[in-house]
Image (cartoon, helix red, strand yellow):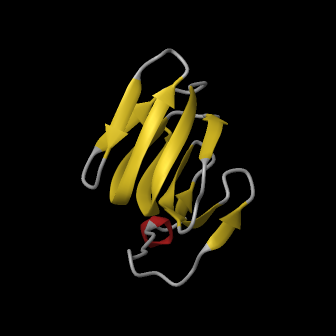
């Protein structure tokens, strides 16, 4: 495979979104190598909360909106635009989002 086949490009203004039935968000997958997956996630009109157990390490950068992440171990993270966090595989957390909410995420790379 040529190196140019491994170059992936997207934009914050992308119009290409797919529904993620597990989380209820829309995603724009930048790349997926089997070990690592990266892209954008968008929650437009979310009410209530979402409890989710991470299948892989997730590292994210908040691009828009706010979130309060209540981790099952008792810690609570208050995230706003520009904040980053990296959560280990297996973390169970309840997410409370202020929408619209967008993030750049990377799953994997444990």
Q: Is residue 98 above or below residue 110?
A: below
**Looking at the picture, does residue 22 appear above or below residue 4?**
above
Q: Residue furthest bottom?
A: 15
Decide: is 36 above or below 56.
below
For the point 39% across and 76% down, which residue is it? 11
Q: Residue furthest left?
A: 82
Residue 82: percent from left, percent from top: 24, 53
Q: Is any atom of residue 110 visible in this view?
A: no
Q: Quadrant of the N terminus?
A: bottom right
> Taking 72 as reference, is 13 above or below it?
below
Figure quadrant of residue 18? bottom right
Q: How many marks?
A: 0
Q: Is residue 54 found left or right of 106 in the rendered image? A: right
Residue sitting at x 35%, y 53%: 62
Report the side of 47 relative to 39 (left or right). Answer: right
Percent coordinates x, y for residue 110 in the rendering: 48, 29
The one of 97 and 12 positioned closer to us in this rendering: 97
Residue occupying image coordinates x 31% and y 43%: 84
Q: Nearer the viewer, residue 1 or 77?
A: 77
Q: Is residue 53 left or right of residue 12?
A: right
Residue at image point 58% right, 52% down: 33
Front residue of 19/74: it is 74
In this orientation, does residue 32 appear?
A: yes
């Amino acid at each position: 495979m040529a190196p140019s086949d491994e170059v992936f490009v997207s934009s914050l203004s992308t119009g290409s979104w797919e529904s993620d039935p597990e989380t209820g968000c829309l995603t724009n997958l930048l790349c997926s190598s089997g070990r690592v997956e990266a892209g954008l996630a968008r929650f437009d009109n979310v009410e209530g909360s979402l409890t989710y157990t991470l299948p892989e390490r997730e590292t994210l950068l908040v691009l828009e909106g706010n979130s309060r992440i209540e981790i099952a171990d008792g810690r609570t993270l208050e995230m706003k635009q520009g904040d980053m966090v990296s959560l280990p595989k297996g973390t169970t957390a309840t997410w409370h989002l202020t929408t619209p909410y967008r993030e750049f995420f990377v799953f994997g790379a444990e």
